[in-house]
Image: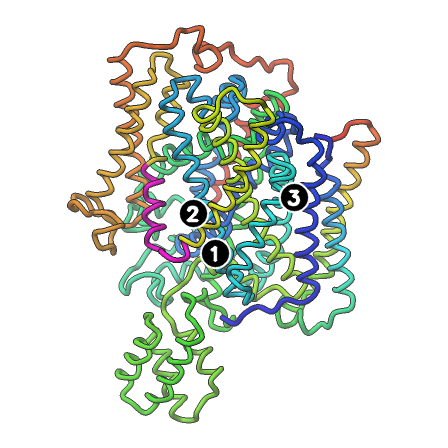
Amino acid sequence: MGLDIRLPIGLMFTLVGVLLVGYGLFSPQEIYDVHSLGINVNLIWGGVLVMFGALMLFSALRGRAAGQPK
Amino acid sequence: MQAITLGWLDYSILAIYVAFVVGIGFALKRYMKTSSDFLTSGRSIPTWVTGLAFISANLGALELVGMAASGAKYGIATSHFYWVGAIPAMVFLAVFMMPFYYGSKARSVPEYLKMRFDERVRTLNSVAFAVMTVFASGISMNALAKLLNQLLGWNYHLALWICSGVVLVYVLKGGLTSAIYTEVLQFFMIVLGFAPVVYLGLRDAGGWTAVNNVLHGVAQNPATLHLKEAGTTYAANAWTSAWQPLLAGPANNPMGVDLFAMVFGLGFVLSFGYWCTNFLVVQRAMAAKNMTAARNTPLVAAVPKMLFPALVIVPGMIAVALTAMPAKSYRIPPPILSAEVYAQATAVVKANAQAEPQTGVQAVHDALGKKVDTAKVIALLKDQAAQPLADAQIKDRLYGAIAEYDYDGVILSLVKKYCPTGLLGLALTALLASFMSGMAGNVTAFNTVWTYDLYQAYLAPHKSDDHYMWMGKFITVVGILLSIACAYFASMYNNAMDIIQLVFGFVNAPLFATFLLGMFWARCTGTGAFLGLFGGIGTSALFHSMTIAAGNAPGVKGGYLSVVRAFPSEMAQNFWLASFAFIACFTLTVVISLATRRTKTDDELTGLVYSLTPKVVDASQAWYQRPAVLGTILLIGCVVLNYLFW
C-alpha cells in the first residue's frame, strides 16, 4: 500500500513531543512535586518522543529517497 | 476515587491522536479498489508492520488492564501467560502453521478449514468466531466507556459512541490496511505512554529489589492487606518467583494452580489454541507481502511480547508493594462506589461516632456494602468522636478502609498518581489506543469472516467483487453497531457476560486439537473433525457442570449438575477444563476419522497438510530471515527469562 506508516507515526510523536517539551519548560514545578517525584517528566519524556518521532521521520524520508516506499 | 481532571494539553494530545488515526484511514481510502484490498489488505504489507499489528490487535483492554490486575493478584507467575504460553505458540505458528495458512491462499482461518475439511467445519468455526468477535469488542467497549465515565466524568453513552465512531471511520475508509497501520501507531503509543508510569512507580517504591522485599513480607501474610483469607500464608517468594511456588503445589501459590494445568492447560492447549487458530491475530500475518514475511510476522511480534511483562505485570506488583507501604499513601482502588453510597456511609460515621465500636463497624459495613478493615473504621470513628471531621476527610478514610479491591483499576490508579498534566494525556491516550486497537482488530476479522465465509459461501455466491466490497463495508457498520449493542447488554447484565465468556471458553478450548490433526495428519476426515469438535465442546460443558472452584457457589461458575471435583481457583478449573476438552476432541477426531472414509485425495490436500506439502526452502535467505533460526533464538530467550525469574 502506498502509504509509509513511519511518516504519520514520526509526525505524530514529534508533534506530541514538542507539545510536552514546551509545556515542560513553562509549567510550575509544583505539579511535578505532587505527581512525578519532582521529576519534570513532560520535559524529559517529551524529548524522548521527539527523538523517536525524528528517527521515524528520518527513516521514512531515507526510504523514500532510496526509492523504496515502505 | 476522585475524578481526574484533564488540562487543555491532555485534550490536545488526545485530539492529535484521533486526528492521526482518522487521517490514516482517509489516506488509505484511494487504495481500496477491490474487496481483497479492503478485507485482506491485498497481501502487501511489510513484516515489521504486520508483526507489530499482530501484537497490537491482541493488546486490547484485556492485556493492559487484566494483566496488571493479575500481576497484583498473582505476582510474577502471571508471566507464564507470556513465557510459557504466548511465545512458544507464536514460534510454532511461524515455523509450522503459517506455510499452510499463507500457502493455501485461504483468505481466512475458517476458509482454510473448508479447504482442509469441508463446509460444516468452516461454518461451525466462522459462526462461533463471528459472534465471539462482536461480543469481545462490545465487552471491551463497555469497559472503556465505564472507565471514562467514572474517572473523567464523561457521559457513558457519548464515550461509547464517539470511540466506536472513530474506529468506524478509519476502518471503513482504509479497511484492514487501515486497522493494521493504526495498530502499529497504537503499539508505539501504548509502549511510550505507559513506560514512564511504570518507571515512576518503580522509582517511588524504591526500585525492583525494594518491591521484591516488600512482596516477600506480603506473601508471608497476605491477609494484612486483605489479599487473601485470614490465616493464609505462602513462602516469601510466592509473588516474586515464577516457578518455585508452582512446583510447591496449588496450595502454595496465589494462583492456586498445579504444574500440569499450567504447562499443559495454559501453555499448550489454551495458548496454542489462541495464538495459532484465532483469526483476529492470524489475519495480520496473512496480510503480509510474501511467505517469508508472513512466517516472520509472529516472530517479530514475539520480541515485544516477551518484554511486555515489564510493562503490564510489573505495575500490578508495584501496586501491591505501594499498598503495603503506608508512607506512600497509595492503595489498590476499592470497588467503585457511587457518591451517594459514600454520602450515606459518611452520615453513618457521624451518627455512630459515640456508639460501641462493634456496632459502628457493622453499620459502616452495611452502609458501604463492602468488607471493611475493622481497625481503620474504629480509628475513624474514634477520631470523629474526638473532633468532628470534614466530610471530604471522612470520605477519604472510608475509601482507604474498604477491604476489597478492584484490581482492574490498578493501571489507572497509577496513571492518576504519577502523571501530571501532559504525561496524563499521553497515558490516557495510550489506554484509549489499546481499546481502539482491540475493537478495530475484532471488527476487521469479523467483516472478513462474514463476507467471505458466511455471506459469499451461503447467502450470495457468484456476485461481482464490487458487491462483496460493498458488503464488506456494510457489515463493518453493522459489526460496530452490534458491538455497541453488546456493550449496552454488558452494562446491564454482568452475569450474562459471565455466561457468554464461559460459552466461548467451551467453544475455543478444543479447537487446537482440530487444527493440529488437520495440519499434520492426512488421514483426518471432515466428519472426524466436525464431530470431534462437537465432542470437545460437549466435554467442556460437562466438565464445567461437574467441577467448581473454591469460594464459588454452584451455578454460573460451575458445578450445577454435581460437584465431582473442587479446584483451588477458577484459573485451575479453566486450565483443567481446556485440557479435558482438548484430549476429548483429539481422541474423538482420531477415532471417528479412522472409522470414516477420506473424502479428499492426496492431491487435494497438497498445501494443506504437512506430510503432503513440499517444505518451504529458505536456505537462500539470510540467517536472520529464517523462521526456524529466529524461532530458536526466541525460545532460548524464553528459557533465559524463565530461569532469571525462577
Read off the residue under disc 1.
B316
Tell me whether circle 1 and circle 2 mark residues in contact (CB < 8 Å): yes
Percent across and percent down for residue B284 are 56, 32
Give the main secondary structure, helix, strand or loop, of the magenta stretch: helix
Report helix, strand or loop for mark 1. helix
Q: Using the numbered discs, state the Cα–Cα distance from disc 2 to disc 3 in whole angstroms.
A: 27 Å
Labels 2 and 3: the sequence-earlier one: 2
Which numbered mark, 2 or 3, is in the foreground of this view? 3
Q: Is residue B129 left or right of residue B532?
A: right
Camera sees residue B429: yes
Read off the residue under disc 3.
B185
- Quarter of the rendering containing residue B612: top left
User: In the image, what residue occupies the spot 55% across and 14% down?
Assistant: B616
Q: Using the numbered discs, state the Cα–Cα distance from disc 3 to disc 1 in whole angstroms.
A: 25 Å
Percent across and percent down for residue B300 are 59, 33
Percent across and percent down for residue B159 are 55, 58
Residue type at mark 1: give it.
Gly
Residue, far right = A65
Percent across and percent down for residue B348 are 35, 84
Q: Which residues are magenta?
A: B490-506
